[in-house]
Amino acid sequence: MLLHWLVAAGIAFLFVHGFYMMRFEGAERLPHLNLHRSVGVTIFALVLVRIWWRMVHPPPPIPMPEVQSWIAGYVHVLIYALLIVNGIAGTVGWVASGDPVVFFGVPLAGERTAVPALNRLCIFAGLTTARILIVVVVLHVIAVIKHE
């Protein structure tokens, strides 16, 4: 449960922070972008740990009709798939941006040659998966409330 809530809190932070940091332009945005990227990579790592944990420790079955059980399983797989694609897009996009890699204030790599086409593709993939994820998470929360 701890991994679930850490990932959920991280995703909520990234949604809110993503909208907030868009208010800034150019060099003013870079510190916010570095924080967003740092948190994003951390959450991506936690998602991978959570997937591993779920594979090793499957959740107990919840009594519900078979069709609801299938839908719940599909939604969980969809959430994980969106988080993985988003995490890959964010990480690759960070490298493709050419920006210095600064992880929570610690410089890991200086500026590199940017790959603009790849960076744009990663931004598109990241924004698309984030928007879909919002809808799917809302449906997930509604289902949880219904079952509680």
Image: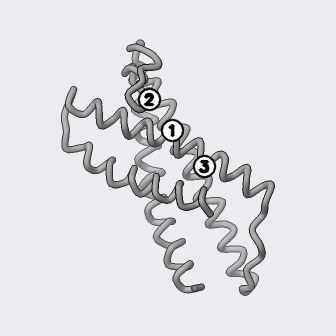
Mark pair 3, 1: CA separation: 10 Å
Q: Residue 41 carries which label?
A: 1
Along the line of sight, the residue nearer the viewer: 105 or 98: 105
The disc at residue 113 is: none
Instruction: Check whether the beta carbons of the residues at disc 2 and disc 1 lie within 8 A of each other.
Output: yes
Q: Which quadrant does the C terminus fall into? A: bottom right
Query: Residue 100, image x and y in percent?
Result: 38, 20
Q: Mark 2 points at which residue?
A: 103
Q: What element carries label 2?
A: strand
Q: x%, y% of residue 79?
A: 58, 59
28 to the left or right of 105: left
- Taking the image as shown, residue 125 lies to the left or right of residue 78, namely left
The residue lying toward the viewer, choosing from 4 and 122, is: 4
Please tell me which residue is depicted at 76% across the width and 82% down the height of the picture.
66
Q: Earlier in the sequence, mark 3 or mark 1?
A: 1
Give me the disc on residue 47: 3
Taking depth in this image into account, of 5 and 138 the one nearest to the observer is 5
Q: Earlier in the sequence, mark 2 or mark 3?
A: 3
